[in-house]
Image (cartoon, rainbow, N blue to C red):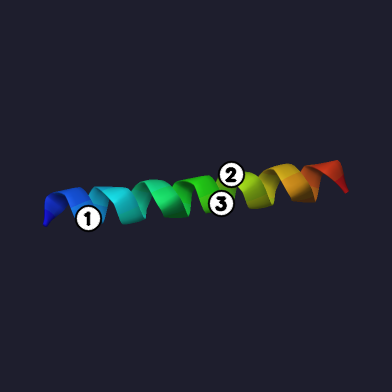
């Protein structure tokens, strides 16, 4: 159960990171 939560957490973190990168590039 915790593994799934951690995976979702990391995915959301990567999503925010990617969004930040694209926003700064533009």
Q: Residues within 10 Å of mark 1 (few under 14, many from 20)?
A: few
| Residue, disc 1 | 4
Q: CA distance from mark 2 to mark 1?
A: 20 Å
Q: Residue at x 43, y 51 (%)?
A: 11
> Does the residue at mark 2 contact the one at mark 3 (Cβ under 8 Å)?
yes
Q: Residue at x 45, y 54 (%)?
A: 12
Q: Which residue is mark 3?
A: 16
Q: CA distance from mark 2 to mark 3?
A: 4 Å
Quadrant hosting residue 17: top right
Element type where label 3 sits in the image: helix
Position of 14 with respect to 1 (left or right) is right
Residue 22 placement (x, y as % from top left): 76, 48
Q: Is residue 4 above or below residue 14?
A: below
The answer for how far apart the CA atoms under marks 3 and 1 are is 18 Å
Numbered mark located on residue 17 in the image: 2
Task: Give the residue at the far left of this rendering.
Answer: 1
9 relative to 21 in the view: left or right: left
Side of 18 relative to 10 (left or right): right
Whichever of labels 3 and 1 marks the residue nearer the N terminus, that label is 1
Classify mark 3: residues with Cα within 10 Å, few (<14), some (14-19) or many (20+): few
Helix, strand or loop at label 1? It is helix
For the point 14% across and 51% down, which residue is it? 2
Query: In the rendered view of the protein, which quadrant contains the N terminus?
Result: bottom left
- Mark number, residue 26: none
Indicate the secondary structure of the residue bearing disc 2.
Answer: helix
Residue 15 rendering spot, x and y as whole percentages: 54, 53
| Residue closest to the far right | 26
3 vs 1, front mark:
1
């Amino acid at each position: 159960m915790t593994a799934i939560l951690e995976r979702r957490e990391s995915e959301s973190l990567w999503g925010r990171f990617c969004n930040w990168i694209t926003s700064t590039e533009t």
